[in-house]
Image (tube, grey):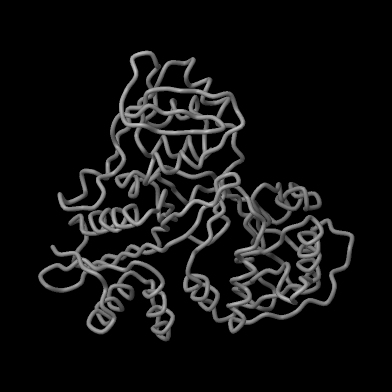
Amino acid sequence: MRFREYNPDTDRAAAHRIWREIGWMREGDEEPTDLYFTGGRTWVAELEGEPECLSQTMSASVRYLEEEMPAAVLAAVATSHVARQRGLAKRLMAHLLALDAADGALLSIVGYFDQGYYNHLGFGNGSYEVDFDFDPATLMVSDRARTPRRFTRDDWEILHAAHLSRRPVHGRCNYTSPVHFRVETAHHKTAFGLGYCDTPDGSPSHCLWLNADNMNAGPYRVEWMVFRTPEQFRELMALLRSFEDQVRLIHLRQPPGLQFQDMLSRPLRQRSITHRGGFENAAHVTGGWQVRLLDLPGALARTHLMGAPVRFNLLLRDPIADLLDDGAPWRGIGGEYVVAFGEESSATPGQSAALPTLTASVNAFSRMWFGVRAASDLAYTDELSGPPELLQQLDETLRLPEPNPDCEL
């Protein structure tokens, strides 16, 4: 087993083979796939001298309240059919995260195929995401949308710039490189964009990107939206309603902070009427992403909370340490700390006999810090425990909006 950086001149064929074997690449996808490999830190693991596993992280920023924190997105993990169940992927990912942490990333975020696998790397579940399937005729918007501008995949640069400027919510993730956005925009052959350019420089102010399984009646899928004001959001909804004479179903992920059911007319009645039909109106809730801290002192130095200050000892366990080689530039963040949460937060190695103690895995602590779940709730379902009085104090101090990456992970 050997880890090394991906070499496009010598590893391209093997990388394509791996992605074809797992169903990530179809005929004609070679060019965007090659472009994707250039978008971040891409490494391969060799087995018997041949690349059989490829992993990639991408540089990003993640918003924590008013702070933009440097982060690493675990963007791709692919193992060939002949190299499964050997630990290649986990060890290669751990190595990449060590390199990202050494380069200054404070946290990492990942979109997962199922719960459990990335927990071995210290990741804990993020907040739920709600997906709506609805008839555009049921959208409750009174205004008529203006004639929109049409966008194509060739407009990826201005669309990427607009996407970076979307509504700044807690947890928002922005990729540093435009490569991920460019590839995702071009991935679906039937995709198209619509929107408006109301900014002083004529760039997109609010817009959406759609993909259709059936261009005739739908479903249409809203892949992403950009808006910053209530008026812009409602105009995009009016634009979707304008499809009502032909399209029977639209799929949309609930925008962060909003309760999309507010926009629908008699949603429970619609669900009953369309149940088990070809265009069923429904809402589905899933947890599809995870988060972990990579630098505890660094992240807490940028954590500014409005609640009452609280100080405690932290005994932190990091499972990633078991997957790292002795020569790794970072060993995880497990250990003993004195932690302070408040307007000025901090984490200092050591222990204080005068303070209560919180015991946690990095998985659970990251979830608490990010605002996914309160400390008292995590004590029921995750690896986090402490005196009831301390848990209550943490609940009151870490009153955060629900985090949402609001992007494709």
Give me the residue at 66% from left, 78% from top. Answer: 215
Q: Is residue 384 above or below residue 137?
A: above
Q: Is residue 257 above or below residue 165?
A: above
* Viewport quadrant of the N terminus: bottom left
Give me the residue at 21% from left, 69% from top. Answer: 52
Instruction: State the residue in front, 90 or 264.
Output: 90
Q: Is residue 200 above or below residue 125?
A: below
Residue 105 is situated, as x and y percent measured from the top left of the image, at 40, 53
Residue at the limit of the structure toward the left, as seen here: 48
Using the rendered view, name the quadrant where residue 140 is placed: bottom right
Using the rendered view, name the quadrant where residue 86 is placed: bottom left
Q: Is residue 405 above or below residue 196?
A: above
In-image side of 188 versus 200 (left or right)? left
Residue 381 is situated, as x and y percent measured from the top left of the image, at 43, 30
- The reply to whether residue 219 is in sight is no
Residue 139 is situated, as x and y percent measured from the top left of the image, at 79, 58
In-image side of 276 versus 205 (left or right)? left
